[in-house]
């Protein structure tokens, strides 16, 4: 036989969380027991753990079963069943286990139909009783002495009730108009405990202390606000990315302070001193037309009164930023001023004449160049150069169709001028038109009207090389050697400068987007393109491209080749442009030496200067062009007789011997 008897009753109420022990008496004979289980409430599918203890040895068929529930969970509340069965029969016992919860109170304020309503939501088990209190002043709990009014809500609205779990009720209190400096308190109580929450009425001019919204309105508002914030954040990140991608004005020139092996230390131009001796009164400047304008700034023609001497009147070029410039661009312009003052003066660079750094925007006063940049000068003169383009390897001396016109006056070396933008991309810099008819302007007009000859091209090449040799002697790397960055002044004196400020590189096809920067890749050495390494030797490569520009009269380098993966492969494989139309073989040999893939095999600027100056000396003997120095070059000869043997000797000169080797070590690298 079997019989299950409850120890107490069939209903258990356990505070949450609790540790109840449920006892049952079980009468059965063990030798006939088939099984003894307790069925737990859903969602359990396994029998509960059961401890079976014998009550008395005398009554061997009577036992006590204890079910222990540790830290009772809400899911363990429900209906339990004991089941004992043997061959003599079976017996069951079912009981209910309900959790007890103390009250939890939440007060909300709502404005409905011009009425102010307080909602008190209470949860607990057994169902709590709700009481409203009104008291004077602002307090966290209404004391008996402060209570002005009490409302008992004996039948709050039941919102939800789960079997064996807590009940949720809601009580409303309509308060009409606000009575300021008041506190309302909602109290709830049941057999397990009590709880309360105050609601403070605002003072005049304040908003209520609690302003909850109805969830049906609150949730969409929150979602909309979060979506708007996410959209604004995404837009901000996009604008920040665009700002990072936007090219910034920076000085291309870099000055090496020291190096050890491949570790270079560059001078921070912002740390260079600025000598106040360059300061010039901005009131003594009379501005004229704009010579060039770019994304960051512009260059303006001006007349300086008292620059150098009190009674002097000098035409100058003034470099300045646009009014929309940012602080980093202002710092870059100041760095350019410090670099120019640090380098000093040379006839083949655009020299600093003065500056205005106080009482207004920074102004850099430089020499004015009446003929503008070399690139546009060559393109204008191209129509006056007679004769068809030469095939590679053909000297102009052997081409009878080439017309050479001797100069009527000697070159006069004179400092002046600045740069501009040229054809398509650059605004040409022209001489200022005045009513003056002095002899110097007449000479300038006469000089500008005559066609070019080879000695002019050689003259430009030599002067640029001298300017670059000067920069190299000052440990300065230019990084943008090109005909557009060379200016011409009176006497066709060539001057090197950095004119990125007045150039719109965003719309200049010569500057290609590579990474986050726009770079003149057709003028750059392979190590600069692929490894971001800039050296004196990389400037030599760029100078070779400039030579090609000069002797092609301003054609674009690598004609017919787009800057794409094919172009980069050609450069990496050692491709070299063909001999330009007006370049003799030995000049083309200098270009080829400049384009050596191994930087240390390229000639130095000092060596290039020596070679070109020797050519100029031969040209003064009224020869159209002479080859590089050789034992047979000292005598006279017909200008139409090519000197191919001497040209070959020059090529050997650039490729062998200690004198022909670059003076710089192979580790002159700048790592980006």
Image (spheres, helix red, strand yellow):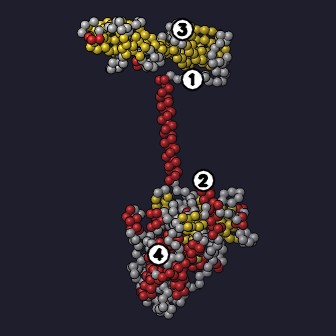
Residue 8 appears in the rendering:
yes
Q: Secondary structure at mark 3?
A: strand
Q: Are dots 1 and 3 in contact, CB under 8 Å? A: no
**Residue at the disc numbered 3:** 153
* Residue projecting furthest to the left: 87
**Residue at the disc numbered 1:** 211
* Image position, residue 433 (x, y; %): 62, 70
In this rendering, the label closer to the viewer, 2 or 3:
3
* Image position, residue 483 (x, y; %): 51, 71
What is the quadrant of residue 402 in the picture?
bottom left
Residue 113 appears in the rendering:
no
Question: Horizontally, is 306 left or right of 18 in the view?
Answer: right
Q: Secondary structure at mark 2?
A: loop
**Residue at the disc numbered 2:** 326
Q: Residues within 10 Å of mark 4 (few under 14, many from 20)?
A: many
**Residue at the disc numbered 4:** 601
- Please name the residue shown 54% across and 19% down the image: 106
In this rendering, the label closer to the viewer, 4 or 1:
4
Q: Residues within 10 Å of mark 1 (few under 14, many from 20)?
A: few
């Amino acid at each position: 036989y079997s019989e299950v008897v409850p120890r107490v009753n069939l209903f258990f109420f356990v505070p949450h969380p609790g540790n109840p022990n449920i006892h049952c008496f079980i009468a059965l004979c063990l030798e006939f027991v088939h099984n003894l289980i307790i069925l737990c409430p859903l969602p359990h599918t396994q029998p509960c753990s059961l401890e079976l203890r014998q009550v008395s040895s005398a009554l061997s068929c009577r036992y006590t079963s204890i079910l222990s529930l540790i830290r009772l969970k809400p899911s363990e509340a429900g209906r339990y069943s004991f089941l004992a069965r043997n061959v003599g029969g079976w017996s069951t016992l079912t009981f209910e286990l309900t959790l007890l919860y103390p009250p939890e109170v939440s007060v909300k304020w709502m404005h409905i139909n011009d009425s102010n309503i307080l909602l008190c939501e209470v949860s607990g088990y057994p169902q709590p009783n709700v009481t409203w209190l009104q008291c004077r002043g602002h307090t966290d709990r209404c004391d008996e002495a402060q209570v002005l009014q009490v409302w008992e809500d004996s039948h709050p609205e039941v919102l939800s009730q789960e079997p064996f779990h807590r009940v949720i009720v809601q009580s409303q209190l309509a308060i009409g108009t606000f009575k300021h400096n008041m506190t309302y308190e909602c109290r709830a109580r049941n057999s397990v405990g009590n709880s309360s929450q105050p609601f403070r009425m605002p003072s005049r001019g304040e908003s209520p202390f609690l302003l909850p919204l109805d969830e049906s309105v609150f949730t969409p508002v929150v979602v909309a606000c979060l979506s708007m914030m996410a959209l604004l954040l995404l837009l901000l990140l996009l604008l920040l990315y665009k700002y990072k991608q936007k090219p910034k004005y920076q000085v291309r020139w870099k000055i090496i302070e020291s190096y050890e092996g491949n570790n270079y230390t560059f001078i921070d131009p912002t740390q260079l001193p600025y000598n106040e001796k360059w300061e010039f009164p901005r009131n003594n400047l009379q501005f004229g037309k704009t010579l060039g304008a770019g994304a960051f700034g512009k260059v303006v023609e001006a007349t300086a009164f008292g620059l150098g001497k009190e009674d002097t009147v000098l035409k100058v070029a003034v470099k300045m930023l646009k009014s929309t410039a940012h602080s980093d661009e202002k710092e870059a312009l100041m760095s350019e001023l410090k670099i120019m003052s640090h380098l000093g003066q040379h006839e083949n660079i655009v020299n600093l004449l003065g500056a205005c750094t106080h009482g207004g925007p920074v102004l850099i006063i430089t020499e004015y160049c009446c003929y503008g940049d070399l690139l546009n000068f060559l393109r204008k003169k191209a129509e006056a150069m007679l004769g068809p383009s030469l095939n590679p390897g053909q000297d102009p001396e052997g081409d009878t169709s080439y017309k050479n016109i001797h100069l009527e006056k000697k070159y006069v070396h004179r400092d002046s001028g600045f740069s501009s933008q040229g054809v398509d991309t650059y605004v040409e810099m022209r001489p200022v038109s005045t009513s003056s008819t002095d002899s110097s302007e007449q000479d300038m007009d006469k000089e500008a009207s005559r066609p070019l000859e080879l000695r002019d091209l050689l003259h430009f090449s030599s002067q640029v090389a001298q300017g670059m040799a000067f920069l190299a002697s000052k440990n300065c790397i230019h990084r943008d050697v090109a005909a557009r960055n060379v200016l011409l002044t009176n006497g066709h004196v060539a001057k090197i400068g950095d004119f990125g400020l007045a150039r719109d590189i965003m719309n200049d096809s010569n500057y290609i987007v590579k990474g986050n920067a726009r770079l003149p890749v057709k003028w750059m050495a392979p190590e600069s393109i692929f490894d971001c390494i800039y050296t004196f030797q990389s400037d030599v490569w760029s100078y070779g491209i400039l030579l090609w520009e000069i002797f092609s009269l301003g054609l674009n380098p690598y004609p017919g080749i787009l800057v794409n993966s094919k172009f980069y492969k050609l450069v990496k494989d050692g491709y070299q442009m063909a001999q330009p139309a007006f370049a003799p073989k030995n000049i083309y040999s200098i270009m080829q030496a400049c384009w050596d893939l191994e930087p240390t095999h390229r000639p130095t600027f000092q060596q290039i200067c020596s070679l070109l100056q020797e050519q100029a000396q031969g040209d003064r003997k009224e020869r159209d062009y002479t080859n590089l120095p050789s034992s047979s070059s000292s005598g006279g000869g017909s200008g139409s007789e090519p000197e191919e043997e001497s040209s070959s000797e020059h090529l050997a000169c650039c490729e062998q011997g200690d004198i022909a080797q670059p003076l710089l070590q192979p580790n002159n690298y700048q790592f980006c």
